[in-house]
Each structure stands twice: as structure tokens, then as C-alpha cells.
Image: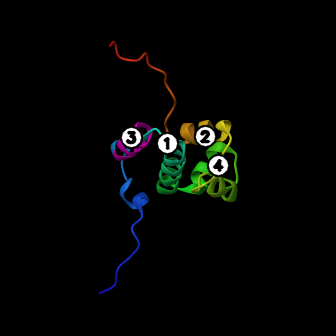
Amino acid sequence: MKTSKFDIADYLDSDEMIIEYLNAALEDGDEKTLIVAIGHIAKAIGMTKIAEKTGLSRPSLYKALSEGSKPQFSTILKVLRAIGGDIQINPPPAI
């Protein structure tokens, strides 16, 4: 029996799945998890497409969104906007 390596990007095939995955990464609260999640989403959409939208090269994107990387905040914002997301700050819930 032949098996293949699991790749979450194969399952990020709808806006709903992408949003749920990104929100789960945000809830985790770990910046490394968020960066890798954004990389998985970019891969699912297509790095070439994301590179065109952000003005960054594909190799730069792979490097910036890989595990252990420390991309600039501007890079994260560009990629988030390219994948159809944005950052919004909400007040904390009342205690």
C-alpha cells in the first residue's frame, strides 16, 4: 500500500476552510503557528498567484512563510491581503 505525505494545503479548498484554519491558528496565539498557517494558505491558493499580488518573488514567499522564519510585518500584511484577509482589532469582551 502506497501512502502520501499529509499536506493541509490540499484541504484548504474553500473560503470557509481557509477562514476556519486561519482563525484556529490565531486562537493558538503563537506567531510561528500563524506564519506557517499563512504559508499553507498561500500554497493552497498558489504561490505564483500570491507572488503576483504581493510583488514578492516565489522564493521569498516560501522563505518568509516557512517554519522557523521571522518575516517582516509588512510581508505578512501583503500576503494576508493577497489571500483575501485583513487584520481587524475588536474590543475585548466585557468581564
Query: Residue extending furthest top?
Result: 94
Residue at horizontal 49 percent and vertical 24 percent from the top? 88
Q: Nearer the viewer, mark 1 or mark 2?
A: 1
Q: Nearer the viewer, mark 4 or mark 2?
A: 2
Q: x, y (%) of residue 15?
A: 38, 43
Picture quadrant where residue 4 is located: bottom left
Name the residue tied to disc 4: 52
Q: Nearer the viewer, mark 1 or mark 3?
A: 1
Marks 4 and 2 close (CB-CB < 8 Å): no
Name the residue tied to disc 1: 30
Q: Earlier in the sequence, mark 1 or mark 2?
A: 1
Nearer to us in this view, 39 or 81: 39
Q: Amino acid at mark 1?
A: Asp
Stretch in magenta? 17-27
Q: From mark 4 to mark 2, how far is it between C-alphas?
A: 15 Å
Q: Amino acid at mark 3?
A: Ile
Q: From mark 1 to mark 2, how far is it between C-alphas?
A: 14 Å
Is residue 59 rendered magenta in the image?
A: no
Q: Nearer the viewer, mark 4 or mark 3?
A: 3
Few, some or many C-alpha atoms within 10 Å of disc 1 (few <14, some 14-19, many ≥20)? few
Q: From mark 1 to mark 4, how far is it between C-alphas?
A: 28 Å
Q: Earlier in the sequence, mark 1 or mark 4?
A: 1
**Is residue 81 depicted above or below 58 in this figure?**
above
Q: Earlier in the sequence, mark 4 or mark 2?
A: 4
Q: Secondary structure at mark 2?
A: helix
Name the residue tied to disc 2: 76
Name the residue tied to disc 3: 19
